[in-house]
Every structure is written in structure tokens, then in C-alpha cells.
Image (cartoon, grey):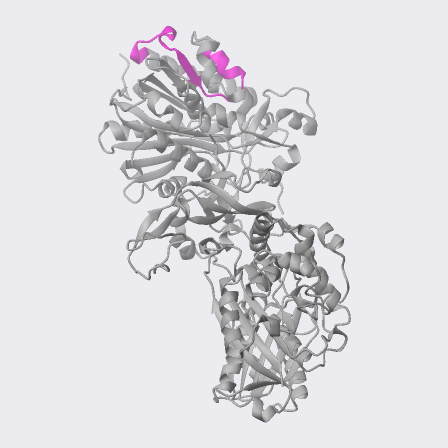
Amino acid sequence: MRMITVKAVNTVGIVGYGAYIPMGRLKCSEICRVWGGLEAPIEEKAVAAMDEDAVTISVECARYALKRADISPEEIGAIYVGTESKPYAVKPCGTIVAEAIGATPQVTAADYEFACKAGTEAFQTCIGLVSSGMVRYAMAIGADTAQGRPADALEFTVACGGAAYIFGAKSERTIADLEGSYSYVTDTPDFWRRSLEMYPRHGNRFTGEPAYFQHVIGAAKGLMGELGYGPGDFKYAVFHQPNVKFPIKAAKTLGLGMDALKPGFIVPLVGNTYAGSTPLGLAATLDMAAPGDRVLVVSYGSGAGSDAFSFVVKDAIEKGRHLDPPVSTFIGRKRYVDYSIYTKLRGKISR
Amino acid sequence: MRRVAVAGVGLTGVGEHWERSLADLYVEAAQRAFDDAGTDEIDALYVSNMGSAVLQRQLHLGAMMADALGKRGIASFSVEAASAGGGVAFHEGVRAVASGLCDCVLVGGVEKMSDALPEEVAMTISMAEDQEYVAYTGVTNYGLCALLQRLYMERFGARADEVAMLAVRGHEHAEGCSHAQYPFKISVDRVLASPMEADPVHSLECSGIGDGAAAVLLKPAEEAGEGVEVASTAVASDVFHLTERPNLLTFDAVRLAADKAYKAAGVCTDDVDVLEVHDDTTITGVISIEDLGFVEKGKGAAFVAEGNTARGGRLPTNTFGGLKARGNPLGATGLYQIAEVALQLGWRAGKCQVPEAKVGMAQSLGGLGSTCAVAILRRT
Amino acid sequence: MSVPRYWREIKHRYRLLGERCVSCGAAFFPPRAVCPRCGSKELEEYKLSEKGQVISWTVIRNPPREYEKYAPYVVALVGLDDGVRILSQVVDVEPEEMKTGMRVEATFRRVKEDGDSGIIEYGYKFRPIIE
């Protein structure tokens, strides 16, 4: 008899969401030009401007989410920012976001770190706070401007961006309701960054089966088992997108096709926005989903773990959708830089 | 109030005086003013300076210069009004003598900009503006002038070459000026080909980084005898934030100070034979000429371009080079202008002389015109 | 940058909060203690419009200390939709694309840092409106 350690909560929904991707773009062919190599795994990736960071991206997302949610910022009781590119090692991004949107001072705020699943880790906490009645609204943000080691395979995909979600009790105002969530976490050191290091390291092929797939499939199957769903129950699926191949393979393993992945599949033109990846994929999906659509969301964070969620889209989604630019607008809004400007923007060279 | 005479003037050259300190320069200018006046028995001295706190980490210049001159015990005053400091200090010195409270006053200004790197100098000059909401944007003084120049050109249809002529004219006048920082001609093409400092302002439209000191000695006109007299001085302020000014292309402080000065002196624009305006950029000089009442709003650039401000023209302006060619050592600049007007009215301007000059005006600005000091001098 | 000096302006910079005179209705940014229009000392917090248009603009090519790494950057005088004017950098735009009259909206960006170990200063900048 399997013990259920984390209950599936179904009293909570998403009240508003907002996304942001910086304008800068680096064509991955530029990386090939500089470091050799003939094949780039994706077309291009998003690069933050010199004056952007995980905090500024979080604030953008938070403001957009507030607009769609149409609530007063003072009603927000918790703000969590999940990121692995904190501008301060000590001083939360969360407090700056809280101040920027006017949620202070009666609010709890902090930052989460769990590599690329830090944003959805914050989802879990928000769900807990709202469903317990401790707060009325809670905001979870996943945003990153993570660093890629020059000439490393990951340099092709590491990108900047994020999305924010405001959770509240299920009501006719919620745009998508949660049916349940499931977290699958083990100590698996597939990718890490020591405290004072600028760049992470990783286990190369070890990041595949024992890491990404073990946890993504584990969480997805765990959730589907709890809720009694099969692949056919889901219209759309959003997986963490570290590259093009992994999410497609995960979908196939679970019996889901490209049609389900397509709306949220942004990695080819944006790259892997780390803690922003799954939240952004979900935002892109919500931008076009219809009421009644069921969405499977499975994040992955190295270290390692996955959070899986099942959301059902509601009528209210049509109401607030047009209030903010869709993810596709941010994808199309771009200005190319070459590798030399990229190294300046990313702080790899400085005055 | 008694009439006040400019009994003597003293200037150092404007340039990069690596080996001279603030005190060295002030003392040199003061000594020349003492020699020119034939006395050094002052009751009080004023020191105008803008950036010493940052550039030299030095405050309390009043006390410092009194001691440097060996005038221990006299009343000494430091005056700071950004780059209007010289004009403001002059206004204060004149009032001290006019009121009868003092009989002999030295008013000097000194600045050493070459001690710091250009970025630090730009930062220092920006300290004339609100640090939290103007300087915080990263805008420089030249950037603020550029905002005005773009608006001026779009609103009045002035051409870039017309605006640039004030710098060209200044350089023409600086040839033969022994204290000018850049005593050579430049063509309008060269100005327009120079790199952008802050679009659309070109670098050769902006005053440079220089060191210098200028001083004047003031005495009651009765005692000084014939020479150059202060007809009036005036100081006025304007809205501190450019964003809150009702008319972006008008320096209200200039209009107010000029009004007061003309009335008190009993002169009008037609009476002015020589004018020193504050051209830290060409556009501020042009707008100043308009707001001093010499030409209609929007026609200033054409007025200059047509030759009216040449030494032989209707309104000889910046007769030793102005801020652009003579130089702009911030806190000293206003006193350079006043000393130059005094030299003109004393018919001692050498190669720069405007023949038969009898009435002269000096105008200096602090920041983007938040302070304006105007002085009108007359030959007696 | 002194920490208290930065901290005092946080809500004004982060949330575009100025003051409005209760007596005559004039709005100001930055905030002030006395209404320059009518002299009243009764002022209330006022949230500025976040959208406006460019009245004039320039490109800073020789920046002051601490702004070097961001140069060249655009600074503009912006006329907000509520009539208040604000001075701000304009980002996400190339100097060649700048035009008087361009519609812009507020965004939140890094302004500067106090070296590698001091505080990071954030604030408003404007950008062409993202539709």
C-alpha cells in the first residue's frame, strides 16, 4: 500500500499569469563560428540586456501577471522567485519584486533554488499557502539569466526569460484550476554550480536517463496514477525544455504526441530559460488554450527533481488573455547580437 | 547704496595647469588684481568654486584662500552656485561694498578640472542637477543641453550649422587672446564633423576641461575714480527640474535676472556694447542671448549665424572666446566674463577690443539655468 | 551610493509615485513637500501614468562615473499621458530608431551597481510599447 506523502490539492487555481523574454538574440551559429563545430542544437537563444537580470525579468512577469489577474497587489500574501542567477547571493529577489509591485509590507517573500525547477517549486509552496487559507493570493515566479561556460555544449541553449503565476482559491475568476500536483525528488548530482563559481558543471550523458528522464517520467506517472489519468486525457503537455530532443522523448515515453507539445515548445527560438523554462512553456500554452483543455506540466530541476501538475483551463481565460502581450510577441520581438557583444552583455568581459 | 567700481582685475590663462594647485591659481589671479588696482588692503574675500569637494577633496576654500594670500583674520566666504558661482559671488561682493559694510573686497573664482578623469568631471558637473531624478538617469549636462537643442531645432527650424556658429565665432574672437584655452579659429565644418558628444550636440560645441582663476577687486566708486563701474547685478533662480518647466526653451532665470539688472542699471538691450554669455554648449548660449532680450525667441541661432555677434557686429559677444574658446573653469567662469567686460570697458582688451565699448553685460548659468547671475558694467 | 539615500527613493522609483496637490490638483514627479503652484503643503501620493511619448531625446556617449558600462544609451524627456513629464533612459531601442513623438512605456531595469560588492540600484527606464 503506497503511502501518499504529498496530497493532491484541487481547491486552487491560477488567477493570472505573465511572461517576459528579453529582446537580445544570439544565433547559435555564432557559437559554432567562434568555437568550431558544425551543428547547433537550436536556432537561437534569448540574451538579456546589460541592465536586465533575474530581478528585472521577475518584476516584468509579476506586473504582467497582476494585470491579467486584476487584483490589488496588496492582496498578495506571498511572493517567491525561483532562479539560479540571483544577482545577490544573500538578499532575496522576492523582496525587490514585492516592493516593485506594491505588495509590501504585509507579505512573505523569499527565493527558491532548485536549478530549472525552482519556479515550479514555488508553485507547490503557493498551492500550499492558498489551499490552507493562510494567504488569499500567492505569486510564484521562475526567471533566469543563467551563465553558460564558453565552448560547453550548454552554451548553445542557456537563455534568459521567465514567467509569473498568481494562485488563488478556485472560483469563476480562476483561468485554470489545479487538479493535483506530484513532486519526485532524489539526490542526483547531474548538474551543479559551486558557490563562488561563475559557470556550472554537468555530467554530460548522465544528465539524460538517470536525471531528466528518471524524474520527469517518475513525476508524470506519479501524478497520472494519483489522478487516474492516461495520456489521452491531456490536450497539451509542457515539459522542461533543456533542448529539443528531451521533451519530445519524454512526451513519446508517456504516450503524448507533438500536437500536445507544440504550443509550449519554445526552446528552438528562445533556448532554455532554466527556472523560466516550464513556466514560460505553460504561459505559451495558456496563451492559446481553450476552456476545458487539460494541460500536463512537468518541470525538471537538476539536483534533481520534477514537479508535475494537471491544470484544466476555464472560461475566464478568454477574459484577461489580451491584457498582456502573448509569449509569441516576445519571441518575435528581437534584436541580434554577435558573439563579441554577447560576451560583453553576459559579463564574460568587462571594462 | 553707494556706487561700486571694479578697481582691478586679474586672470590666469585657462589650460591644464598640472603643476599649480587651487591655491596657487587663486593667489596668482588675486595678485594680478591687487597689482592692477594698486592695493591689496581688502576687508573681505569671496571664493567661487564648483567642484573642489569632489575633484580635490577640498572644502572651506574661503578660509584656505584668505590664509594663502596672507590675509589672516579677514572675513572670507565660499560661494557655490554650480557654474554661476562667479556671477553670484560678484553679486555678493558688490552688495558688501554698496551697502557700506566693506570698503575693499576681492571676489575670485578658481577651478581645477584637470585633476580628475573625464568621467569624474562629467559626474561633478552633473551635481548641479537633482542627483536622484536627473543625474540618476545617467544624463550629463551636455545631454540636457542636447535635449534642448533637438527641441529648439525641431520647433524653430534652426539648422545645425546655425547653432554651431556661436562656437565658431568664439574661436574667431579667441585668436589673440592671451588667456584663452583654445586661441585658434575653427570652421563650422570642423565643428559639425566633430564626434557627437550627446546627439545632436557635437563635441566641438561644448566647452572643455580646463583650470583657471579670475579675480576682481571692488571698491566704492568714489574712491576708485574714473574707470569701470558696476551698473547693476542680479541673481534669479528657475524651476530646478527641467521636466517641470512650463517653457522648455526659455530660461526664466535669465529673463528674471536680466529684467532686474536692466531696470536697476537704467539701460536697455540697445545700450549694451559688449556681451559675455554662458555658452557651455552653443545652444545654451543661443537661448541665453534670446532670453536676455537681444533677439526674439527662436531667432537666436540665425542671429548669431548672420554675424551679429562678431566683434564688428551689432552685438559683440564672447569677445575673448566665451566659454567654448576662452574656457569654462566652472566656478571661475563668471568672473572671467566680468573681468573681460571690465577690460573691454577700460579699453584694455588689446587685440580683442570692441572699439568705444561703454556698457557691457556678463551672464552666467548654474546647471541648466536653475541659477542665473547677470552683471552690467559701465565705463565712467 | 549611500544605502539610506537609495532606500528613501525606492517606492518612488520602483512604482513611479509622485505627489499631487490636494488643493489645486497639480501633480509632480519627483515628490516634493510644497506645491510650487499654489503653495499648499497638503500633498498626497500620486501614481504616474506608465505610458507617454518622447518630447526630446539624446544619446549619452561620454557617460559620467558609474554609467560607463551602459554607454552609449538614450536619455529622453517623456511626456506622460497624465501630463507629468519625466526624464528617463529609453532602452530596447537603437539610437537610429529614436523619434520625437515615439510612444513609450515604463519598465524596471538595473541603473548601476556600487562595484562588485555594493548594492545594486534599480529604477524606471522607458521602452517602446510592447503591444
Q: Position of residue B247 (x, y in %)?
A: 48, 55
Task: Determine the image quadrant of residue B132.
Answer: bottom left
Q: In the shown orientation, is residue B37 left or right of residue C127?
A: right
On the image, the x and y values in percent for residue B233 come to 53, 76
Horizontal side, residue B189 vs residue B3: left or right: right
Please provide percent x and percent y for residue A351: 63, 47
* Percent position of residue B231, x then y: 56, 80
Q: Look at the image and tell me whether residue B329 can be seen.
A: yes
Q: Quadrant of the N terminus of chain A?
A: top left
The answer to whether residue A53 is left or right of residue B225 is: left
- Please give the name of the residue rendered at 32% of the width and 11% of the height, measured from the top-left corner: A225
Residue for point 39% across, 11% down: A235
Q: In the figure, A226 relative to A54: above or below?
A: above
The residue at the far bottom in this view is B223
Residue A245 forms part of the magenta stretch? yes
Seen from the viewer's position, the closer of residues B167 and A72 is B167
Closer to the camera in the image, A93 or C107: C107
Residue at the extreme front of the image, as rendered: B270
Residue A324 position (above or below residue B227): above
Magenta stretch in the rendered image? A225-251
Q: Quadrant of residue B190?
A: bottom right
Identify which residue is drawn at 42% across, 33% down.
Answer: A61
Q: Is residue B313 above or below residue A54?
A: below
Is residue B78 rendered magenta in the image?
no
A242, A216: nearer the viewer: A242
Residue B61 visible within the image: no
Label count reads 0
